Image: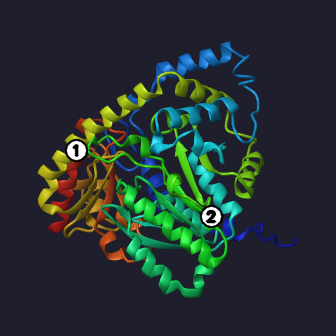
Amino acid sequence: MRVLREMLLSEYGKASSTPSPINRLMTDFAVDFRDGWDINLGAGYVNENTIPREQILHACGEVLAHPEKYRAALNYGGAQGSPNLIASLQRFHVENRIGGMTARTFRSREILIGANGATSLLEGITQLLPAGIVLMAEPMYYIYCNDLGRKGFRVIAIPEDDEGLQTAVLKAKLKQLGREKEAIRFVYVVTVNNPTSTIMSNRRMRELVEIVTRLSHEVGRKIPLFFDNAYRDLVHDSSVEPIASPMLADTLGIVYEIGTLSKILAPGLRIGYLIGPRGDFLNGMVQRTTDIGFSAPLINQEIASYLLDNGIEAQIAKVNRAYRQKATQVKAWIAALLGEDIAACRGGSAGFYFYLTLSHVETGVGSDFFKFLTRTTGRAEIDGTASAPQPKVIYIPGEHCVHPEGEMVEVGKRQLRISYGFEELPQLHTALKLMKAAIDFSSR
């Protein structure tokens, strides 16, 4: 009998058959994660207490009770998204002057609802644009960076400072690229960066728009500039300057903003949206949504529309109060418990991450620090036993957040992202005390 070969895979299929480092890390840990005992500072889950369950239940009832407004809410929806939700998002931005947007901002722009949250929109970009160079800030959003690599894109990471992506470094890199600039496909930045929670300043944002505008003229075509606003509504430090929409500085029609309701309502609703200029790209994104499932679940879109129209401002205020309280306390604990072992600490003003750089201890998967916290040292007095288990702590090692060919490889070995979103304060305090113990163990 003829020996059968394995099925043929595309280049993307071949790349995807090997799990990414983060995929392996999260899967390995999740297999034996013990709820109520182990502590999750890794996955960027929102805090369960910020999800408005009663309001969502009420909104669902209102949607189903009023088919004259929320038409066929349990059926398929249109690919661009629910007209109700699109109108609600525009009203929300205009009435609350989100980023300084006005009705005029939307005269030449459209809103598209993603098929499955903001991530589906990011994935759609990789399908519509040809492979080439992508510029982004470093430390970088590791999940999207890994996806770009599997799709054949070449990521060039530009280190950030306290104001976000360093535009001076970007200019130098563009000059260095020379004729390779022709291969630049798009620029991607996260307004409140993931993993660092660094808030991009309005000054830096305007400068970035100017640079990409000049670059577009230089190469003779529009280079899109995508701003990921996943955490923009979670700026909970009142001393921070309100974030302005980069669209206000866009004279060429190259700026797109990606938003989500996951952080202020519920990730399970899977509502992400794209705001951008009308044209072939946006039309293509609508078609992409059709190709992968017609639309996001219409009932979820209508629920989100109702919530946006009925008390979303109070919900956002509640969410930010909760994260502000946690950020303040966790930052104090970091200083008290880890202060002398920390070289740098970012975050605490927006979102729910702190990004730490340790002074001398490495944090990667093979490090003693990691083995101590995951209880894989091979020593019973550290790892515990079946009858006397020790709690594990999951975090994101910095080695996964820096580009392997970038400028931050060495410092990334001593970095880590911790989330104060999901766990409550007692668990967060315990985790930081365990991190101190892990540093001491590593040092010995």
Which residue occupies the foreground of this view, 443 or 133? Answer: 133
Q: Quadrant of the C terminus?
A: bottom left
State the SS at label 1: helix
Q: Position of residue 197 (x, y in %)?
A: 35, 53
Q: Position of residue 223 (x, y in %)?
A: 61, 68
Residue at image location 51% in from the left, 21% down from the top: 310
Estimate the spatial distance between the alpha carbons at disc 1 and disc 2, rounded to whole Å.
37 Å
Badge nearest the viewer, 1 or 2: 1
Crowd rating for badge 1 (residues with CA inside 10 Å; few <14, some 14–19, many 20+): some
Residue at image location 14% in from the left, 57% down from the top: 339
Residue at image location 72% in from the left, 17% down from the top: 67
Q: Quadrant of the N terminus?
A: bottom right
| Quarter holding residue 74 | top right
Does residue 394 sit above or below 267 in this rendering? below
Question: Residue 433: in sight, yes or no?
Answer: no
Q: Is residue 439 left or right of residue 114?
A: left
Does residue 82 sit above or below 341 in this rendering? above
1 or 2: tag closer to the N-terminus? 2
Residue at image mark 1: 330
Residue at image location 61% in from the left, 43% down from the top: 106
Q: Which residue is situated farthest in the top direction here?
A: 65
Q: Is residue 258 left or right of residue 319?
A: right
For residue 16, the mark is 2
Crowd rating for badge 2 (residues with CA inside 10 Å; few <14, some 14–19, many 20+): some
Which residue occupies the foreground of this view, 412 or 438? Answer: 412
